[in-house]
Image (spheres, helix red, strand yellow):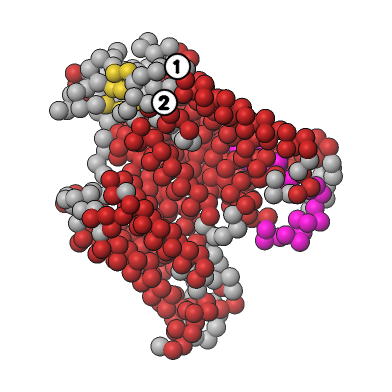
């Protein structure tokens, strides 16, 4: 365990990861101040947490560490544990419900877990393909993708993926699909071996 | 390699650098993905949103192009700008100053501008072919210049997005900065105008970087056209980006050697132009929100 912690402490790009978590915390404060804008601020908060997960596999020395005796699988599996950081931020927000926003806790926990899992899996997959810093590209794309449904739900009367209040079954089904996809991507990314 | 074969100064050298940056942008995966998503979303909307009267709420659709192409351009342009940092020593010995390279990077806005124009043309052609409801806010119920101004907001926003990306790439050094800029853009645009839309002073929402002029279908089948002058707002957007001033010149500001007195006057002039366009947009045009005649097939409540 101490070896894993030592590796995580030195190997993870903590600055951007924690920076995204701080952005999530700031958004949570904004949510507490303006709960009526939860339709946008809650997804923005999710975007920050998902973007944080995108940095979990950033490793500038990847070409070197990928061939160490300990193995690429050990490295990827160890790094997956770091997703607990953005997940914890998300869990705290959903539990505390800043501004008394009526977030359905099980549903919104599923939303956060699914999004973070899919993003972390995608980053792991990129890392497996020897992309040293997938977060630089993945984080902005994920942030925009997470907030995109909000823009269109209001304008085109499309159903929202981020329901405030009741959490309808069709939305739950969509997020379960995202979670399953994330699980599948993680499984592919974490399977033993060095290359795809 | 290619830089050594380029003229070190003059218009020819700058043109060569600009062409390289435009090509890099056109081939950037994030930009290509954004363009593809924009057109797929437009196609899906036209095919799946079923209405016997034709394409519904067509004047809201420029948002699709501006969102997907414009925000993808923010990210792609920032990544392009930052990509030179990995070879900073080589870049330092390349011909031209940082300001000159930044100006060349502004050419990365050309592919998004073209993609946005194609999107707008596709939108107008689709509306012409499939038709729209006679009560719809479109040609016939609005002056042509107002419709064109709103439709052309899409390519201008795409261009602005790329220029903002250059700005973000030059000034913001942390990883994922372009994502934060894109999310901030969305949050500011939505929260900056949402509280004003249904008020008597809705025209003051026009300070945001993407203002909506059409609310979509109301439950009673009507549509609301929000107050303000779309042509002046288009000028405001152009002043922010397409005329390049605030975004590109802001990026050039990063190079201390570029801060000549003439440059400072130019910045001040463009800021003044942007303010003038904003005031014109808010004080001319429709002074109140206008409600269309109801479209019976769209009544939902």
User: How many other residues sit within 10 Å of disc 1, few (<14), some (14-19) or many (≥20)?
Assistant: some
Where's the C terminus of chain B, which quadrant?
Answer: top left
Q: Residues within 10 Å of mark 2 (few under 14, many from 20)?
A: many
Q: Position of residue B31 (x, y in %)?
A: 53, 44
Q: Is residue A178 visible?
A: yes
The magenta stretch is B85-109
Q: Residue at x 42, y 31 (%)?
A: B205
Q: Which mark is residue B285?
A: 1
- Label 1 sits on a secondary structure element that is loop
Q: Secondary structure at mark 2?
A: helix
Residue B203, disc:
2
| B9 or A68, nearer to the observer | B9
Residue A98: percent from left, percent from top = 28, 58
Q: Does the magenta run of residues contain B102?
A: yes
Residue at image position (47%, 79%) is A8
Subunit of label 1: B
Host chain of mark 2: B
């Amino acid at each position: 365990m101490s070896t894993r912690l030592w590796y995580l402490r030195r190997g993870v790009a903590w600055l951007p990861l924690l920076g995204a978590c701080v952005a999530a915390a700031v958004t949570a404060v904004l949510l507490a101040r303006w709960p009526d804008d939860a339709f946008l601020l809650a997804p923005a908060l999710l975007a920050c947490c998902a973007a944080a997960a995108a940095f979990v596999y950033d490793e500038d020395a990847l070409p070197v560490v990928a061939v160490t005796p300990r193995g690429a699988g050990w490295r990827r599996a160890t790094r997956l544990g770091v997703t607990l950081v953005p997940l914890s931020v998300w869990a705290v927000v959903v539990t505390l419900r800043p501004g008394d926003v009526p977030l359905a806790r099980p549903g919104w926990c599923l939303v956060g877990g699914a999004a973070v899992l899919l993003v972390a899996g995608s980053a792991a997959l990129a890392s497996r393909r020897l992309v040293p810093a997938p977060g630089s590209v993945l984080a902005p794309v994920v942030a925009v993708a997470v907030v995109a449904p909000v823009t269109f739900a209001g304008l085109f009367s499309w159903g929202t993926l981020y329901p405030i209040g009741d959490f309808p079954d069709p939305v739950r089904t969509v997020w379960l699909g995202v979670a399953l996809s994330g699980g599948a991507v993680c499984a592919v990314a974490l399977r033993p071996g060095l290359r795809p | 390699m290619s830089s050594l074969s380029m003229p070190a100064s003059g218009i020819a050298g700058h043109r060569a650098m600009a062409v390289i940056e435009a090509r890099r942008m056109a081939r950037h995966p994030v930009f290509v993905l954004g363009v593809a998503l924009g057109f797929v979303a437009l196609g899906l909307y036209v095919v799946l949103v079923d209405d016997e009267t034709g394409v519904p709420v067509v004047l809201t659709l420029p948002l699709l192009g501006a969102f997907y192409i414009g925000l993808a351009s923010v990210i792609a342009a920032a990544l392009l700008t930052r990509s030179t940092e990995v070879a900073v020593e080589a870049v330092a010995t390349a011909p031209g100053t940082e300001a000159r390279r930044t100006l060349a990077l502004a050419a990365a806005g050309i592919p998004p501008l073209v993609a946005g124009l194609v999107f707008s043309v596709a939108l107008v052609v689709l509306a012409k072919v499939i038709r729209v409801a006679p009560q719809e806010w479109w040609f016939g119920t609005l002056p042509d210049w107002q419709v064109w101004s709103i439709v052309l907001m899409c390519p201008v926003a795409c261009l602005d997005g790329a220029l903002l990306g250059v700005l973000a790439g030059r000034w913001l050094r942390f990883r994922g900065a372009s994502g934060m800029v894109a999310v901030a853009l969305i949050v500011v645009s939505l929260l900056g105008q949402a509280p004003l839309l249904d008020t008597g002073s809705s025209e003051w929402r026009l300070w945001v970087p993407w203002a909506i002029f059409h609310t979509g279908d109301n439950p009673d089948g009507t549509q609301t056209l929000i107050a303000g002058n779309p042509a002046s707002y288009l000028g405001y957007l152009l002043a922010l980006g397409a005329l390049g001033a605030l975004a590109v010149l802001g990026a050039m500001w990063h190079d201390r050697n570029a801060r000549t007195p003439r440059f400072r006057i130019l910045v001040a002039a463009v800021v003044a132009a942007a303010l003038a366009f904003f005031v014109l947009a808010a004080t001319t045009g429709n002074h109140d929100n206008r409600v269309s005649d109801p479209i019976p097939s769209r009544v939902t409540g």
